[in-house]
Amino acid sequence: MSGGGYENGATSSPSAEPSLITNQLSVLSINDDEHSSVSVEKDPRKIARKYQMDLCKKALEENVVVYLGTGSGKTHIAVLLIYEMGHLIKKPQKSICVFLAPTVALVQQQAKVIEESIDFKVGTYCGKSKHLKSHQDWEKEMEQYEVLVMTPQILLHNLSHCYIRIEFIALLIFDECHYAQVESDHPYAEIMKIFYKPDVVKQPRIFGMTASPISGKGATVEGLETLLRSKVYSVEDKDELEQFVASPKVNVYQYGPGSSCHTKAYSQKLEEIKHQCVKELHKKAVDSTLRNTKKMLKRLHGHLIFSLENLGVLGALQASCILLKGDHHERHQMVEAEVNASDDSLCDRYLSQVDTVFTSGCAKDGMNPDLALMEVLKEPYFSKKLLRLIGILSNFGVQPDMKCIVFVNRIVTARSLSYILQHLKILSSWKCGFLVGVHSGLKSMSRKNTNIILDKFRSGELNLLIATKVGEEGLDIQTCCLVIRFDLPETVASFIQSRGRARMPKSEYAFLVDRGNQRELDLIEHFTRSEAQMDDEISSRKSRTMVADFQENIYKVDMTGATVSSALSISLLHHYCSKLPHDEYFCPKPQFYYFDDVDGTICKLILPSNAAMHSIDSAPQSSIEAAKKDACLRACKSLHELGALTDYLLPDQADEDKDLVPDFSDLECCEGEDAREELHEMIVPASLKEPWTETDNPVCLNSYYISFFPFPNDRVYKKFGLFLKAPLPQEAERMKLDLNLARGRSVKTELIPSGTTSFENNEIQLAEKFQRMFFKIILDRSEFISEFVSLEKKDFVDSGSKFYLLLPVNLFGHDKISVDWELVRRCLSSPVFGTSVCTSNNMSKFEEQLQLANGSKSVHDVVNSLVYVPCKDAFFFISDVVKDKNAYSMYKDSKNHVEHYYDTFSVHLLYPDQPLIKAKQLFCLENLLRKKGYSELRDKEEHFVELPPEICQLKIIGFSKDIGSSLSLLPSIMHRLESLLVAIELKGCLSASFPEGRELAIDHVLEALTTENCHESFSLERLEVLGDAFLKFAVGRHLFLLHDAFDEGQLTRKRSNAVNNSNLYMVAIRKNLQAYIRDQSFEPDHFYVLGRPCPVTCNKQTEKNIHGLCGSGTDGVKTEVRCSKYHHWLRKKTIADIVEALVGAFVVDSGFKAAIAFLKWIGIHTDFKEPQLKSICSASKVFMPLADEIDVLGIERLLGYSFIHKGLLIQAFIHPSYNRHGGGCYQRLEFLGDAVLDYLITSYLYSVYPKLKPGQLTDLRSISVNNNTFAVVAVRQSFHSHILCDSSDLRESITRYVNFIGRPDSTRRLGEEPSCPKALGDLVESCMGAILLDTGFDLNRAWQIILSFLKPVMSFTRLQLNPTRELYELCQSFGWNLKFLPSKKDGNFLVEARVNGENVSAAASALNINKKSAQRMAAQIVCSSLKAQGYRPKSKSLEQVLKAAIKMEAKLIGYDETPCVLTTICDDLDKHETSESDCDLKVFPINEELARSCNFKSKSTRKLLSTEASVQCNSDQTTMSNGSKEDAKATGGSKTESAKSRLHEICAANCWKPPLFECCKETGPSHLKEFTFRVLVEIEETSRVIESYGEAQAKKKDAAEHAAEGALWFLKQEGYLLDN
């Protein structure tokens, strides 16, 4: 089939398109010189060989596989093809080219070639080179790049989960395409079988490249063509090829034969050591690590025996050293073992003993193991094979510019051999390195280091490379002339590929063969013959593309198209398990058991205990592998239906939530704060926005008297009133406010409604002028320096203006006020405004006059007025005339005023005899709302100065200091009133939206809207802490009940999606909450109101120019411009915090129900239904079979609570490593308990410490709500003694921690505290979760319990902040530099903490399995050391603050829900009996006497993993679809397990050999034959064999089953089976 879908989509006809492109191949541009001024387009055709051009033409016409030898330029043909199909790939086309290469090195190499050859945008993808986790990420990549070079695993993953759809791939190139075989599960094959379907609208053009179309057993050229829907082409003219490609000479070097007797002796010793270790292993308590440790020991042993036989004693010694030195993860990778929980100490002991055997053996024979000092190379220290290799290298080493690659099959061999060859004197001319895969687990083999090694080899810095198969394919090393196969290749493809590394003319390709091993000689002959046959077949056959639609067994999600095949399902299942919650004591992995059925092999799949389902059975299959695939596919289907896999068939993770933007926090961010800020418009309260017009006559304004109560009462304040068109809301009309003045003084203010006041038009104009006047004086006083000041209204009135008047008033009657028009008119009649003073009765003629700088003025006009003193550039209120002093009076002790002003200001006083005037300087307006520390009241009279009148200019007549005192308060009062009105409007919005909104106290709304940036006496932070805790609890409870199949990790991610800052930000924006936020302190310069309009007019067109981008100016400095629209920059986190603070306000004022109603209004669902709770509680009875394993009544006594559903209590103590039951563990309960504990403890702290600052409350909460605190509680309550777990490491860790906690403080040394096992704290959380469920969410009951057993912790007698945080704060206060330097050591983290400062230097290191714990321990040591030297933080410690804090009674805040009523029928422990399905298989009395006669030694009882009844999915469909009608739920019908399959499971679980069934006897005639079977079970650790005979049966299957039952009976007597 031609992949011509894309050609058909072009404007030309389908037939014309290929020929058009083909014609372009032969025509190169002849106008290149015309474009010399522009960058010349790269044209790969210019350097193409003829056969490359010919093959490219073929590839343009149909799908093609190019079969050419290594070095013949296959990649350049692919480059030509990309170039010619550029019109389909180049932007702005949406289609792409995908170039697949099987290894990371090849991906990087081929991407580089493409970039250098053509002008296409190339993206490279391999492993974790790019963190592309979402569909949006991949969409961006496809928009950016035209050619995507990647490993096939990545493309298969992307196609399966719909990150990339095959319709968007125009050209799909397979490098080393021989892996694509019909019977293979290689990603190449999976891509073609699953996604290259006839029904695809646009199929990509396929282009394959290989040096060996047949890769292994069963592979055929026809199969390759069929799968790739392509035709295989090669070069017919071999002479043309030979001009460019050199073939190496093939040589066979023989050694041997056989192993020496010494080698066999060493092998025997190693076998004995292994056997001893296995026996030792079985003395320990059995858990899930037993099997893994046995497997690991076998792998280690096998690799060391292999090294001994192939390298000799010194090679095996080196291998043991390498395995011993590497960390445990690295060791698993080196021996190609799964990384499972195993007893690493036992493996270490085995390796140590082996190392001792080899070292002592060398010493006994007088052989120095130091290779550099070794003169004689002999057996058994060097194997015959290794000696032969050394001989070859020593002969070739004398030749100049030699480069050699030695291929081996094992990582350990590569490292050991590299070390030996590198240190031998005889090979000093060879500079050796090793190359293994980047997934080998070796830290030294990162991609970067791999590339460095290859570059060194290319440059000649290294000339000998020991490589595994990773070096076989595609690595372009042109100068290599010797390739040696130390280990023989495993396939024809491996043979051809490794040979292709010898590129130089007269190169050699050598085999090392045991002359006594005919199989090895035959294998080489087979490779040579197969290659020749392959060449003949391709040159002679008539290729024809087979049209095949492969019917793969798949599961497809109809909604998205996401697809998983049976082969892919295995890796998907492992991926799902890897995402389950895990720690160092529990590594979740699926387990597979196989048993024979009538119709074939059945695989039982058992998932980890914390998975959404426990087990599932495959349908009977023809092989173990097929059964495994079928079980995994069924499991993936069930997990998707349960919601554990998304509709894209991925584990449910936050990364895949398209509706959420990445979370942001208050912590450090590389982008800085401004990058997370946005411009938002603040609302202006409606009460302040309503204007009056000139047509209104009279204008009726609502009046409010502003009363002042100073403390102490020694100041006079002019009475003022507030006048505005709209009435103030009831909650604001009597606003009270305390203003903090300097030196501990304060003024209490209160608004008092005073009815309405009518203003005539002329009065309104006077009032507005007066307001403009005093705002100019207190805020823009520089305007009054000039002789004339205009008070005329501007031509425009901005829509954002606030319309209210602040006017002096007279008080009469009961809270009645009238405007003091006399004062208003007198002030406005001042000459500075262009008017003259009107005096009555010619008083000026008789009044005393004073000579001022701007003329003679009467004393009446001067006193209680405002003057300006130019020489001081200051304004003063004049309060009186000092008649007994003049300018000749002493200014200070040494000078009079005349001398002072002349000396200081060069002012010559002309009227020194005039009396001085008493003046008080005009204040600078301040923010009186700003919170201040405690200031002791200091009685001090007002500060006055005495001035000569002639230096003063009279400015405003009648503008007294009493007016000034009032005006200094009014802007702060109005700012608070505005904030209060905003809060009232928000409350009105909430009240209109849901009835519970009316219950909110306005003070708490205002508090919730006010951020710390306002620097007021209150802020949202305390409410935010409480709201955060409630939000976590309410959402957690909702999710727990809604998603009963979700594991703890999924629940945590779901909750995070709902409560993280990014989601809270978005729901707040949707409800416009950001418009109500008060995030700026009152700044007098930016106080704009009627009479003082904002000078910056803002609209959509000018917004960006005014405010810039992201709150920063052109110089990178943040600019905050106040505009007429009241825009301000808000951090996204601030908007999110408002939501939490409002939740806290609802909880405090109205309770849980109101808070839940608010959350529902903003779009966060927290509701739940009672049946959900009842269902989960009743389902807990599945844990009752474990009632005998745990002291239920004892735990209830510890808790002081008796459970209705005992199963919940049992579940609360099941660690996820324990998987002997039907699945399930405490993790889900832990999730729920964590949320409720967080809220209960936060409620405790909030109520007990009402005066604690928000930051201190947060610190106290973090100290109280953490795993270490709960672990102490667990130990005190003895919870640890009841935990059910299958991890001996966890038990040991718990024991160490419990012993440490129990020791007196005096015996504990700093830094020796063992790591606190998380499981201890988990138990407290899971218990609380269980209690909460069992009480029907009765928080009052949970509150009483938590108070009882958290009481010792909440006393805070030993308060300990996080040592890391404490050290950071200590360093910050002294300006020291702090660094943490982490490193890895033996699988643990070593963290060094260093502090450097002036005259201070301290450092300490700590080692721990957990990096954070190691950092914490190191920080604690350094912190204690610095404290011992006398260094203390400059601020009060939290402990000191708590000692001085006022404590109140603890209260459960806000709980007003009615608990759900659950059934009162308890799970009866006494009546509970294990059902037959929960027990071991019943044993029939068969051949019991015979069985008892077998020779066994008694041993201690051990328990083994028991398996549940299997679960069957009944479906014969090859394609499963989530839209189909079949019921594939994993909890379907059960299936009885046979004794034979059970026996297989027992052997697999113990790492024994499979049981051996034999038909030992046949009796009776042919038509009535009976069969007797026996079964042999070898128990490795006791070196015993069970031999069990069954009774004669008519069917062989029944006879084998009978024999198995007898074996099970024995194993039960020996303790290898559970009793339940």
Image: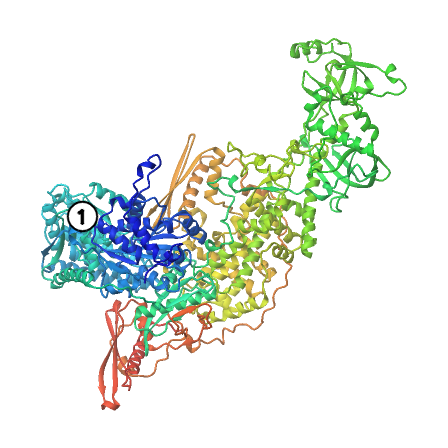
Give x and y (percent) for residue 497.
Answer: 21, 54
Q: Quadrant of residue 12?
A: bottom left
Give x and y (percent) for residue 123.
Answer: 36, 48
Q: Residue at x 59, y 38 (%)?
A: 1103
Residue 1538 in sight in this render: yes
- Check disc 1 and report the residue beneath it: 244
**Front-most of 509 and 1377?**
509
Q: What is the crowding at mark 1: few (fewer than 14 residues within 10 Å), some, or many (at least 20)?
A: few
Q: Amino acid at mark 1?
A: Phe
In the picture, which quadrant includes the C terminus? bottom left
Give x and y (percent) for residue 756.
Answer: 82, 41
Give the image's coloring scheme.
rainbow
Residue 1245 in sight in this render: no
In the picture, which quadrant includes the N terminus? bottom left
**Front-most of 1250 and 291?**
291
For residue 479, above or below residue 641: above
Which residue extends farthest right?
841
Give x and y (percent) for residue 424.
Answer: 14, 45
